[in-house]
Amino acid sequence: MQLKPIDLTQSVHTLCTQYPDLIPVMEELGFKDITKPGMLATAGRWMTIPKGVALKKLDLDTIKQQLYENGFEVRG
């Protein structure tokens, strides 16, 4: 399987625009707001995955592992 590289310094909006299949993965990981109309286009423009992890009090290493299991190579 070819892993899709994602850079954690990029905004959630940028990443989800590049990889639309990331949206349901993010929702499954606990970022349910990403599917609300307008959220990706507003908050998603400045929110990064690490910022969202901190805001939701999740474990970044767990999120990285789950992203890897869903076909994404985490960088940054």
Image (cartoon, helix red, strand yellow):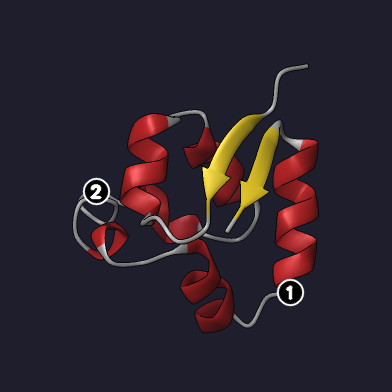
For the C terminus, the image quarter is: bottom right
Horizontal and vertical percent for residue 1? 78, 16
User: How many neighbours does mark 1 have within 10 angstroms: few (below 14), some (14-19), or many (20 or more)?
Assistant: few
Look at the picture and state if 32 lies above or below 37: below
SS type, badge 1: loop
Q: How many marks?
A: 2
Point out which mark residue 59 bears: 1
Q: Nearer the viewer, mark 2 or mark 1?
A: 1
Q: Residue at x 38, y 31 (%)?
A: 18
Q: Residue at x 65, y 55 (%)?
A: 29
Look at the picture and state if 47 lies above or below 37: below
**Distance in Å between CA atoms under marks 2 and 1:** 26 Å
Q: Is residue 74 left or right of residue 50?
A: right
Residue nearer the viewer, 46 or 37:
46
Q: In the figure, residue 14 lies in which quadrant?
A: top left
Q: In the figure, residue 44 lies in which quadrant?
A: bottom left
Q: Residue at x 55, y 49 (%)?
A: 27
Look at the picture and state if 60 lies above or below 57: above
Disc 1 residue type (three-letter): Asp
Report the residue marked by disc 2: 37
User: How many neighbours does mark 2 have within 10 angstroms: few (below 14), some (14-19), or many (20 or more)?
Assistant: few
Point out which mark residue 68 bears: none
Disc 2 residue type (three-letter): Pro
Horizontal and vertical percent for residue 48? 43, 64
The numbered mark, 2 or 1, whose residue comes first in the sequence reads 2
Horizontal and vertical percent for residue 24? 54, 38
